[in-house]
Amino acid sequence: MKLEGKVAFVTGAAHGQGASHARYLANEGARIVAVDICEDIKPIYPLGTREELDGTVASINDAGGEAIAVQADVRSSPEMKAAVDVAVKAFGTVDILCNNAGVCIVEAVDEISDESLDAVIDVNLKGVFNTVRHIAPIMKAQRSGKIINTASAGGLKALPMVSHYAAAKGGVVMATKSWANELSEWGINVNGIAPGTIYTGMITGIAGQLGQDPGEAFEQFNANNMFKGERGHVTVDDISTMVVYLASDDARMITGQVIPVDAGWVAS
């Protein structure tokens, strides 16, 4: 197994991409700290629940892996510090950080409320800073580590009606490149993944905001992908496979990169 003996800290792990990433990392031998807020954030669509987070952990443990659940909000630096402390107490260190927690709201720029602006920026950008700030010292002390940030294809190519989301994800792109330079002295790899549209709770939430059927919205968002039909449907598994690759020694020479996994949408 590629990640035997490693400890992975995964945010947004109750469902969707985060739950998948946690399971994929565990399947390669990593011990998992599964983190999620487990409550809704106004004015966003329903997020993961404590039952779902416990289900992620149970599925890993039942399969012979080792995982713990931590309920914490990435927007809060004290809560992230406490979550990292739990991880270190349970497993001794953190070798892999998978910054997955994210939210999206569809709004015209002149209709963005203070509440939604704070939610989108704080989860997608500030949340990434909060985890890295508390885990980087651990990785620096052991002179190794893999940081994997979930950006977005929408942070690389402009889209209307999601300017706050795109700005936050664009910030993740540049923070990733900056941290790769800053932390290279300690042998830490920092990379990002820019997923295309995936059928998860986020797409159903966005479809609801647009008053569309989720399936129709999903097809609409994928219309400009280079690959068409089923080949043009990026799956959660596609992203999780890239997470495992970047977390492993197979990617030891890759750092400072944000890799689109988007069926060619960014380059189209």
Image (cartoon, grey):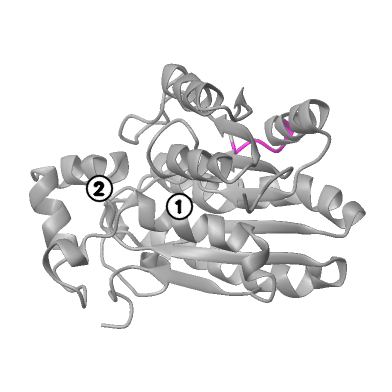
Please, is residue 30 above or below residue 57 in the view? Answer: below
Callout 2, which amino acid? Tyr
Tell me, yes or no, if residue 240 can be seen here: yes
Read off the magenta span.
Answer: 74-78
* Left or right: 200, with 58 as reference point: left
x and y percentages locating residue 240 in the rendered image: 45, 52
Please, is residue 174 above or below residue 31 in the view? Answer: below
x and y percentages locating residue 65 in the rendered image: 59, 30
Q: Work out how far the residue at label 2 is from the one at label 1, CA to CA, in angstroms.
A: 14 Å
Q: Residue furthest right?
A: 141
Number of numbered discs overlaid on the protein picture: 2
Residue at screen point 43% across, 44% down:
114
- In depth, the one of 40 and 180 nearer the eye is 180
* Left or right: 239, with 187 as reference point: left
Q: Mark 1 falls on what kind of element?
A: helix
Q: Residue furthest front?
A: 1
Estimate how packed mark 1 is, as few (under 14), some (14 to 19) or many (20 or more) residues with alpha carbons within 10 Å. Answer: many
Residue on which disc 1 sits: 240
Estimate how packed mark 2 is, as few (under 14), some (14 to 19) or many (20 or more) residues with alpha carbons within 10 Å. Answer: some
Callout 1, which amino acid? Ser
Residue at screen point 80% across, 72% down:
184
> Which quarter of the figure is the C terminus placed in?
bottom left
Residue on which disc 2 sits: 199
Q: Residue 170 carries which label?
A: none
Principal SS element in the magenta part? Answer: loop
